[in-house]
Amino acid sequence: MMKKIALTLCIVATLQLTAQEVEVVKFADLQKKMISTEAQLTVFNFWATWCGPCIKELPHFDALESENKNVKVYLVSIDFQSELEKVKKFVEKKSLQSEVLFLDEKDPDDYMEKVSTQWTGAIPATLFVTDLGKTYFHESAFTKEELEKTIKKYLN
């Protein structure tokens, strides 16, 4: 009996260590991350749980950091403010390893142009920021191959 309890506690502790937290941020906090990049290339992928193309490409973005030490990835959820718990459950279910940010803003028009003047509001959308401050914006879904090619291009 004690062995079963100990094993259960070990499993719960392990799950808590690997479960990804979802950080709730205002746009000003996100902007700070965009300015003070941590890697040679920092990637901000804007997505939502209700966006099919976003969900399809998420695994490609989630794998980037573990595949390349020069890349930092932020998965930025722009789900509605009332859907934070839904996002948390989604992140846990998908076992996402990248840092997940929940953008706590009511009106996308208040931040979209600050991310990129090219952003029409469509998602998925991705902002790439180099350690030299150069930015590249894409408003479309990526295949794994397209994303790998884009990462190589922006790292050079």
Image: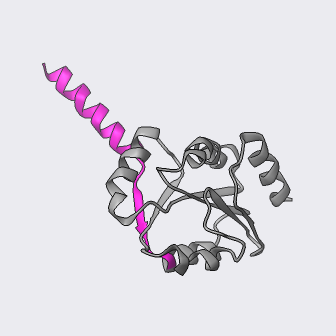
Q: In this figure, what is the number of numbered marks?
A: 0
Quarter location, residue 112: bottom right
Q: Does the magenta stretch include residue 140?
A: no
Residue at x 50%, y 76% (from the top left corner): 27
Measuring from the top left, give residue 69's x and y in whole percent: 69, 51
Q: Nearer the viewer, residue 140 or 149?
A: 140
The answer to whether residue 154 is left or right of residue 6 is: right
Residue 61 in picture, x, y percent from top left: 63, 48
Q: Is residue 20 magenta?
A: yes
Above or below 36: residue 57: above
Identify the residue at horizontal 43%, vertical 47% (top origin): 91
User: Which contiguous range is marked in magenta?
Assistant: 1-27
Q: In this view, does 67 lie to the left or right of 17?
A: right
- Judging from the image, the colouring scheme is one colour
22 above or below 63?
A: below
Main SS, magenta region, reads: helix
Report the front residue among 65 and 43. Answer: 43
Which residue lies at the image location 74% right of the left edge and 70% below the top edge?
131
Q: Give the quadrant of the C terminus.
A: bottom right
How far across and how far down the image is residue 141, in percent?
Answer: 68, 50
Q: Which image quarter: residue 83?
A: bottom left
Q: Where is residue 104 in the image (x, y as percent from the top left)?
A: 41, 70
Compared across the picture, whether 17 is left or right of 96 comes to: left
Q: Which residue is drawn at 61% across and 67% down?
A: 121
Residue furthest top as drawn: 1
Looking at the image, the residue that sits furthest to the left is 1
Q: State the quadrant of the N terminus.
A: top left
